[in-house]
Image (cartoon, coloured by chain):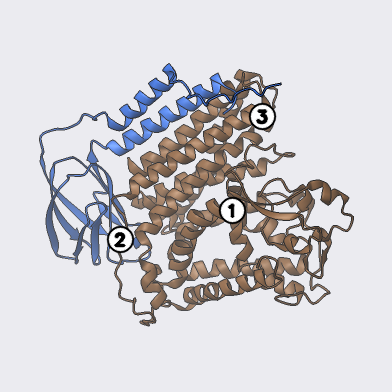
Chain colours: A blue, B brown
Amino acid sequence: MSQAAPVPAQRRPITAGRAILLVLIVGVLLVPIPGFRTPQTHNIVIDASQFEFSPARLTVNRGDIVQVTLTASDVVHGFFLDGYGIDFRVEPGTSQEFTFTADRSGKFRYRCSVACGALHPFMIGELVVGPNELVWRASALAAVAVGAMLLHARKRPSA
Amino acid sequence: MLLSRAFQPVAMLILLAPFVLAVMAGLLGTSAGNRNFGIVFVWIVWWAVLMVLLVPGLGRVWCTVCPIPAPGEWVQRRGIIGGAGRLRTRGLRWPRRLRNMWLQNAGFLVLALFSMVILTRPSVSAGVFVGLIGVAVGMSLLFEKRTFCRYVCPIGGFIGLYSMAAPVELRVRDAQVCVDHREKDCITGNDRGYGCPWMVYPGKLDRNLDCGLCTECLKTCTMDNVVINLRRPGADLAKPVRGNRIDEAFKALIMLACSIIYPAVLFGPWATVKEWAAIESFGGWLIYAAAFLIATLVVIPGLFWLAVAGGQRSCAGGLTVRRAFNEYSHALIPLGLAAWVTFSVGFALTNGSYALAAISDPFGWGWDVFGTRDVGWTPYLSGAAPTIQAAILIGGLLFSIRTSLRVGLRHDPSGETTLAATAPIAAFLLASTLALLWLYLG
């Protein structure tokens, strides 16, 4: 009895479902998110005190110019902005002024960079530079991936 | 090396040294947490190593070398490397009603409620370490073996839970060899090692939850039947849950809830909540504690219960809701672990540079042992961290969805009811992930 010839490995066909999933994922990752506006200038006074910044959350748009006047109302504080590498120190009764262009979108925490007491590591504020693409894309990607896994499970009991 | 009698005691001794230093720094050193070895090395360095590397990569391996139970074990056995024969303990058996994770759940919640104080006050932190050692020693004198580790340690509880997702396991090669072997040295011990200190019978071990990786059974097995395997991550998660393990389900839910609450409280912009958590005012802390407990014990478990019940109702899968709650709670483990990795990565990257100063000046007294005392605070990868965190969270979510599908398929191999049973659970997992993404990135 002759042996059967080995069956060559076949590529899995690209089904309509897979193609749609691929398009969705590419779309989620690459489609531009609207929200661009003419750049504006924001003059913001940020006061640092144990253990909070006021205001604690700022919202600007990408490309905006942010002029900050930093003050401290009790002890020496610092201001470090994640992602931008901005770091300033301010003493009570004085102020520090600095300007930067919000050229990176997303959420960036600003933190006290001078030890100021027990809760110092958690003295945090937030700068949101819109459109916040990362959070929208990540959320959409999560939703698309979950949907795809559930649909795949519906078709084949081999998840 | 693992077969050496000295392996575990020596590893514990080595780690006991920095642990003692952490306690001493906490009690005697500066009250500035970011300059105190006790805070920096435990809550920044150790925590990050534990949650980012050890638990996801090696499961229970921290329990192998943990110094907290070491003094109690050595007092109980009257020796460090080898026992002196007769044990110094009343040898009581742990009450049957407490042979579960409820005490570990309660202990973790108590620590979590005071975590802002523990994280920022070196003396309080040291008090917690001394307290844990004291309880471990006391329990070693009263109860048999490692009862503290198995049923009480609040850290061991979540390490055990998340070790089920790890790619490492201790198992027997052939369970029939254990059945046929009448001496059961792994339980009774012999001249090469102790009977299982964790009160586990290796022959029936099929998941990582209760095995402390102490390596005693590797030593005592005369049949060379105990091995440490590499395996597919999460291999334990879709296995059937024996008996009623609501305690285990609640452990997974409490950990997931805390992984959402912690970034909101610690990394969020809400100073008032931080002050409440730090007990700046007792009334504020009461509000925080009530909200925390309601969220961890009522809201999150309640929503998960509704998701499970909805799935079971729509698929008529033959499981009671309670049973399904137990079984599907394993789907929370990958996402919960990913959420804790995300939290720990962010905290370590931001505050890890404090370690350089603290190692040179552990008490904050002005020492400069390694010439790094004056290294300033430098956050690492502050621009890339959000992308890394998003990737970890989405990875955890997909791992969790896959686990829920595997649990569903185990109950209905035809796959006909899998989607109906798991879709509400997937919605719960997705909602939890979106909440985490918005807390970190939004």
Which structural element holds mark 2?
Answer: loop
Chain of residue at mark 3? B
Depth check, front residue: B232 or B196: B232
User: Whole-Å distance between the Cαs marked 2 and 3?
Assistant: 54 Å
* Label 3 environment density (alpha carbons within 10 Å; few <14, some 14–19, many ≥20): some
Q: Which residue is mark 3?
A: B410
Residue A116 locus on image (x, y percent):
30, 66
Amino acid type indicated by mark 2? Gln
- Contact, mark 2 vs mark 3 (Cβ under 8 Å): no
Amino acid type, mark 1: Gly
Q: Nearer the viewer, mark 1 or mark 2?
A: 1
Q: Residue at x 76, y 77 (%)?
A: B78
* CA–CA distance in space, label 1 to label 2: 39 Å
Residue B59 — which label?
Answer: 1
Q: Could you tell me which quadrant the N terminus of chain B lies in? A: bottom right
Question: In the rendered structure, which disc, 1 or 3, sits on the residue that comes first in sequence?
Answer: 1
Residue drawn 36% across the image and 36% down it: A138
Query: Which element is circle 1 on?
Result: loop
Mark 1, residues whose alpha carbon is within 10 Å: few (<14), some, or many (≥20)?
many
Instruction: Report the Cα–Cα distance between label 1 and label 3.
Output: 24 Å
Amino acid at pointer 3: Arg
Q: Nearer the viewer, residue B112 or B228?
A: B228
Quick check: do tags 1 and 3 share a chain?
Answer: yes
Is disc 1 in contact with disc 3, using a CB cutoff of under 8 Å?
no
Residue B69 x/y as whole percent: 65, 67
Q: Nearer the viewer, mark 2 or mark 3?
A: 3
Please give the residue where the numbered disc 2 appears in the rendered image.
A50
Residue at image location 31% in from the left, 55% down from the top: B381
Whether labels 2 and 3 belong to a single chain: the reply is no
